[in-house]
């Protein structure tokens, strides 16, 4: 099976889902806020993005910051770290992610994002891939803990 969009019962997979995370010691209301703020090294611009009233506004503000020269090479690892935080920090979100089993996770969209997701069935789906990697890492960590508990 495939999860084709991060809406409805799968809205928790979206970066817009309210689940506070940390970036460089500062709290952000959503992964989207933190990711967009990570685009810049300017503390004032980061705060401007962090204080956005919604994830959509944070995304719009993120398009207007002075982007760090190393950002494009770091964006996948930044997103991966934020997702690990989100799903390790909140047991309910971790359980929801695990409840997707081995389903293929696709960030389907209509706005043309073929980097993070897929539009009209085409795209790299990096967000879906990172979510599946996060899910697998959680499964492996749980399995290892259960093995250690059985031995102890």
Image: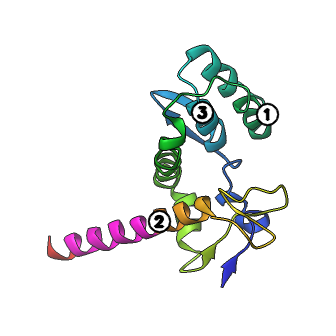
Q: Which residue is mark 2?
A: 133
Q: Is residue 91 above or below residue 141?
A: above
Secondary element at image label 3: strand
Q: Is residue 12 above or below residue 67?
A: below
> Which mark is in front, 1 or 3?
1
- The mark that comes first in sequence, 3 or 2, is 3
Question: Which quadrant would residue 29 be assigned to in this image?
Answer: top right
Label 2 environment density (alpha carbons within 10 Å; few <14, some 14–19, many ≥20): some
Position of residue 93 in the picture relative to residue 111 (left or right): left
> Mark 1 to mark 3: distance in Å?
13 Å
Q: Which residue is mark 1?
A: 57
* Residue in the image at 60% along x and 28% along y: 67
Secondary element at image label 2: helix
Q: What range is drawn magenta here? A: 136-149
Label 1 environment density (alpha carbons within 10 Å; few <14, some 14–19, many ≥20): some
Instruction: Indicate yes or no whether the magenta region holds residue 145.
Output: yes
Q: Which residue is mark 3?
A: 28
């Amino acid at each position: 099976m495939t999860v084709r969009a991060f809406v409805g019962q799968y809205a928790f997979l979206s970066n817009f889902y309210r689940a506070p995370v940390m970036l460089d010691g500062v709290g952000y209301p959503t992964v989207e806020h933190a990711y967009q703020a990570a685009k810049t090294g300017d503390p004032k611009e980061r705060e401007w993005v962090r204080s956005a009233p919604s994830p959509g506004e944070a995304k719009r503000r993120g398009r207007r910051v002075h982007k760090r020269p190393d950002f494009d090479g770091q964006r996948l690892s930044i997103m991966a770290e934020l997702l690990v935080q989100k799903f390790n920090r909140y047991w309910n979100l971790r359980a929801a992610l695990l409840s997707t089993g081995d389903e293929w996770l696709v960030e389907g969209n209509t706005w043309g994002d073929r980097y993070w997701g897929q539009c009209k069935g085409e795209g790299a789906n990096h967000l879906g891939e990172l979510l599946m990697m996060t899910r697998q890492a959680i499964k492996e960590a749980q399995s290892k803990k259960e093995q250690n508990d059985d031995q102890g």
